[in-house]
Amino acid sequence: MGTAQRPARRPVPPAATRPRLAMLVTVAIVVFALIGIALSTSLGDSLSGLVKGPAGGRGQVVDGIPCQNGEQLSYHVHAHLTIIANGQPVTVPSQIGIPGSCFYWLHTHDTTGAIHIEAPSPQTYTLGQLFDIWGQPLTSDNVAGNRGNVTSFVDRAQLTGDPRTIALKDHASIVLEVGTPVPPPANYDFGDLP
């Protein structure tokens, strides 16, 4: 009878190559983790339709404005916001201020830039409050993540000062230009909006 053969053993890497192998595995894990973070961030941004920024209104009170079940119609007016960054329009997202089943008194329904101001009583609301509900920055050099010098217009008249203080008045056409200035567009046609 013949002798039984032992299964072949895999060669053990020399001790000097083990640390190198461990380092390569660690680098690969870190690279894949970073790729995963980058993909989830960019995918999340593209799915949300929003530019990067803080969370904004998710049902909690923001700047004294609650999120309530149903729209308030005692005071119901509209303003319009146009954002232009380096000559290119920036879409104002739909559903700002509508995080689910509640409505903030300042909100959008679509991507036209029409801002609905629907509150229990008339008072002065500002563009800064809308941006806080949206969860986007609004400063003299940053509009919703678009950076550069900001030029503000209301009804085609240029304003100076903090864009956050712009009042959301009935049928006001607000234009925020970031970076390279261009002539502001014509005032928004509110059509059937009261």
Image (spheres, grey):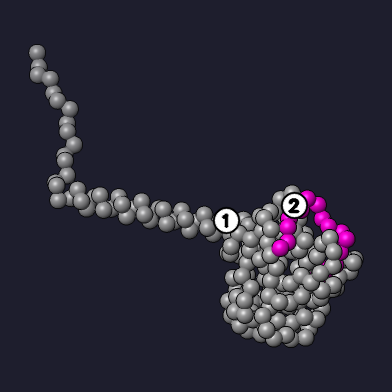
User: Looking at the rendering, in which quadrant would you find the N terminus?
Assistant: top left
Q: Secondary structure at mark 1?
A: helix
- Amino acid bearing label 2: Cys
User: Looking at the rendering, in which quadrant would you find the C terminus?
Assistant: bottom right
Quarter residue 170 falls in: bottom right
The tally of labels here is: 2
In the image, residue 77 lies in the stretch drawn in magenta: yes
In the displayed structure, would residue 164 be above or below residue 19? below
How far apart marks 1 and 2 lie (CA) works out to 23 Å
Nearer to us in this view, 29 or 73: 73
Numbered range of the magenta stretch: 64-80
Q: Position of residue 164 (x, y in %)?
A: 68, 75
Q: Residue at x 71, y 63 (%)?
A: 64
- Amino acid bearing label 1: Gly
Which label's residue is closer to the chain start, 1 or 2? 1
In the image, residue 140 lies in the stretch drawn in magenta: no
Q: Would you say 178 lies left or right of 114 here?
A: left
Q: Residue at x 18, y 36 (%)?
A: 10
Q: Is residue 93 visible?
A: no
Q: Is residue 181 visible?
A: yes
Nearer to us in this view, 166 or 29: 166
User: Can you tell which mark lies on residue 93?
Assistant: none
Q: Would you say 35 lies left or right of 18 here?
A: right
Q: Position of residue 166 (x, y in %)?
A: 73, 77
Residue that badge 1 annotates: 44
Quarter residue 178 falls in: bottom right
Q: Secondary structure at mark 2?
A: loop
Q: Position of residue 75 (x, y in %)?
A: 86, 64
Residue that badge 2 annotates: 102
